[in-house]
Image (cartoon, rainbow, N blue to C red):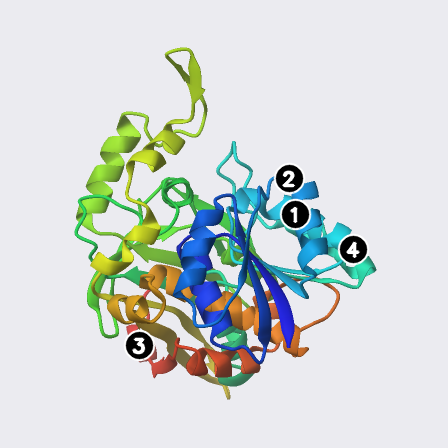
Amino acid sequence: MSRVLIIGAGGVGRVVAHKCAQLPDIFSDICLASRTQSKCDQIASELNCPIQTAALNADEVGQTVNLIKRFRPDLVINVALPYQDLSIMDACLEADVDYLDTANYEPPDEARFEYKWQWAYQEKFKKAGRMALLGSGFDPGVTNVFCAYAQKHLFDEIEQVDILDCNAGDHGYPFATNFNPEINIREVTSIGRYWEEGAWKETPPLSVKRDFDFPEVGVRRAYLMYHEELESLALHLKGLKRIRFWMTFGESYLTHLRVLENVGMTGIKPVEFQGQQIVPLQFLKALLPDPASLGPRTKGKTCIGCLVEGRKDAKRRRVFIYNVCDHQACYEEVKSQAVSYTTGVPAMIGAKQILSGQWRKPGVFNMEQLDPDPFMTDLNACGLPWNVLEMPVEEAES
């Protein structure tokens, strides 16, 4: 039995709170904190067991330290904004508690997706005897564990990985994002990058596209992007020659995005308007639907997985390890759509691995550095069942 502090009460925070509350033998005491306590209270009212709630500005290390010392959690689950990762990690070190997040730190004034800032905490956490688990969402997170499982059980050597993220859900809006618009649009409009033969290669944003046939979804067009798990997987997968990330987008989304980008609404540098400094992307975020409100109206499925190619017993092998998630089924269970569900469930499972001692050790770790087996077992048990599909090697594309 353990105490957990969940920071963040958006769509993902709602899922984490629901899933932790479903396992009271592990998560015996829960506190949900956010800048807006009323959001926490709303989520608390949906649960079958009582939890504590608190108002918290996680940018302020002192506030977070005080809350940690008051609630005394065994683990802090950070599902707040990526800009706040470092301040929450600092608070965990000061208050002497383990840390988990679902996305890498991003500086507010620059669209950069790198682990270097958090990896720099390695010695601090090791010296403190505390653990920081990075990227325990789906991608990153489950995709990392899929690769670790493939490396442990399915291949002697992995040569190529394509991470495929398909959201075939329909929310009915001309333009909306399934998670924080500010984070989503920064990510999508950034330069594409992939790793090949020991070097990073760049492509203009959304300039490389390919059709993939996704199980239970069908053929969808996916675009080459940079995603943070590429950085750690390129470092930790033995024998890897190439790793890429692909994400699907509907034409309506892309058309609106191009228009918004062309008129400057996706900019992250402040501009002066009527005597005030505003960031265009932050203003756009205020105009768009709240991702947490999309659950009741979103229909369809997600399919996310890893297309892995390499050798097993001296023979070439190609498999697709994947999960399919239904938006409406997710909403019925936890009042959130599948994009939040597929991030929040792995956060709970990662927390379970730490609190049970399966994964806990001092230092800063990415998911693929730990034993994939207990995590993969819990995916099946906790609402994200996975499959392994054998793919003909002769159909492999360059």
Q: Nearer the viewer, mark 4 or mark 2?
A: 2
What is the three-letter code of the residue carrying label 3?
A: Glu
Residue 199 position in % (x across, y down): 54, 51
Residue found 59% across the figure and 74% down from its top = 28
**Element assignment for label 2:** loop
Furthest-bottom residue in view? 313
Residue carrying label 4: 123
Residue 194 position in % (x across, y down): 46, 53
Residue found 70% across the figure and 42% down from its top = 62
Task: Give the side of residue 335 with respect to residue 252, left or right.
Answer: right
What is the three-letter code of the residue carrying label 2?
A: Glu
Task: Give the side of residue 30 with respect to residue 290, left or right.
Answer: right
Residue carrying label 2: 60
What is the C-alpha distance between the residues marked 2 and 1? 7 Å
Residue carrying label 1: 64
Q: Nearer the viewer, residue 208 or 102?
A: 102
Q: Earlier in the sequence, mark 1 or mark 3?
A: 1
Q: Residues within 10 Å of mark 2 (few under 14, many from 20)?
A: few
Is residue 163 shown to the viewer in this render?
A: no
Q: Earlier in the sequence, mark 1 or mark 4?
A: 1
Residue 394: mark in rendering: 3
What is the C-alpha distance between the residues marked 1 and 3? 54 Å
Would you say the residues marked 2 and 1 are in contact, meaning their CB atoms lie under 8 Å apart? yes
